[in-house]
Image (cartoon, helix red, strand yellow):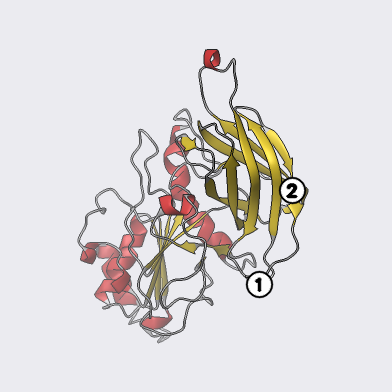
Amino acid sequence: MRHAVKVSVFIPQNQHGFSPELFHLVGFGVGAHVAGIAGACLEGAVGRITGLDPFSPQFSEADSRLSLDYTDAQYVDVIHTNFNANEPIAALGVSRPLGHVDFYVGRGHLLPGCPHALMKRERYILCSHQWAYRLFTSSIGSSCPITAFPCLGVEDYQKALCTSCHHPGLNTCPLLGYDISWLPPDRPIGFQPVTAVLGIAVKEPFCVSPFLLEVHLVGNVSLNAQLFVQLKGGVGKTPVMLVSGPSPMQFDPHQTYQFMVSIDHRVKEFRILSLEFNSQRLLYLQWRKISIQISHLVLTQLPRHKGLVVYSSRSLTAVENQRMEVPLQKEPTREE
């Protein structure tokens, strides 16, 4: 608390005479709440506060006067990277929205490059939490925007229910990071607080090209499985990605399934889509493997705009627990 008070005293008394709206406070973990309290002491006059995965323990249910809140500055943006538990370790970051724009990265744990086991205890506990400041610092001076989609939550995003940039009062997709040139200049902020979700790449500058994958099934066989995909392009390839969620899901015939796929911006001109329906069935049950009939699949660049890039493939048969490589056909540019 005393650190927040010191900051709030320094800002109006700074020797250069800068007004509070010219200040941008950035806080990581507990520091995000310190910045928020300092802003509250100045009655929200600070120009901007950026919270980098605000610390959750002891703050998750704290009064807004003692934690970061969207009233603490003229614009408050928050990057959430560890809002789901790394079992058996609790999440280090707050899961509830706090700012004018709250960016939720991935599934909130086990982000790219983070260990999946407690053997590397310190990295396992801290890795996803530390992604917040890595993303923000890499965005400074970067020409590669990290696009997020307005969405009610991470689960809706994974189900591809958030594929447009529409949000009342905001006519563009929010961009994570230092640059806020996309933000309407009006103050106070003229739109309702927005939750935005995004995927990231493993390597700096971490920006991705978001795509919508649609899989149209036919036949008469169902399968409970997870769907893994990998894209290979004329330039580079992606890692193998789990797109269907952490638990197996039911794939039924005569249904269309949609998934968000975040592709490293350096992978271009897709030629091959590798896919696998992993059923995790016991070996003795696999003597007769199940085949899934796919009438067609479509990969569409997001957000939808003029000059839309679309790839597709048709009439496919995928066998459970076997990787299948599908040639992609780039369709003529379409306009939405």
Residue 306 is tagged as 1
Q: Quadrant of the C terminus?
A: bottom right
Label 2: state its secondary structure.
loop
Task: Measuring from the top left, give residue 92's x and y in whole percent.
Answer: 36, 46
Based on the displayed image, in which of its 4 quarters is residue 287 positioned? top right
- Is the residue under label 2 in contact with that under label 1 (CB below 8 Å)? no
Inter-mark Cα distance, 1 to 2: 21 Å
- Outermost top residue: 284
Nearer to the camera, 16 or 184: 184
The answer to whether 308 is drawn above or below residue 314 in the figure is below
Residue 328 is tagged as 2
Indicate the amino acid at tag 1.
Answer: Lys
The answer to whether 185 is drawn above or below residue 30 in the figure is below
Disc 2 residue crowd, few under 14, some 14–19, many 20+, Cα 10 Å? many
Task: Measuring from the top left, give residue 2's x and y in whole percent.
Answer: 25, 64
- Outermost left residue: 63
Which sits earlier in the primary sequence, circle 1 or circle 2? 1
Give the side of residue 314 with respect to residue 146, left or right. right
Q: Residue at x 62, y 66 (%)?
A: 142
Based on the displayed image, in which of its 4 quarters is residue 247 positioned? top left
Indicate the amino acid at tag 2.
Answer: Leu
The answer to whether 307 is drawn above or below residue 162 in the figure is below
| Residue 239 in sight | no
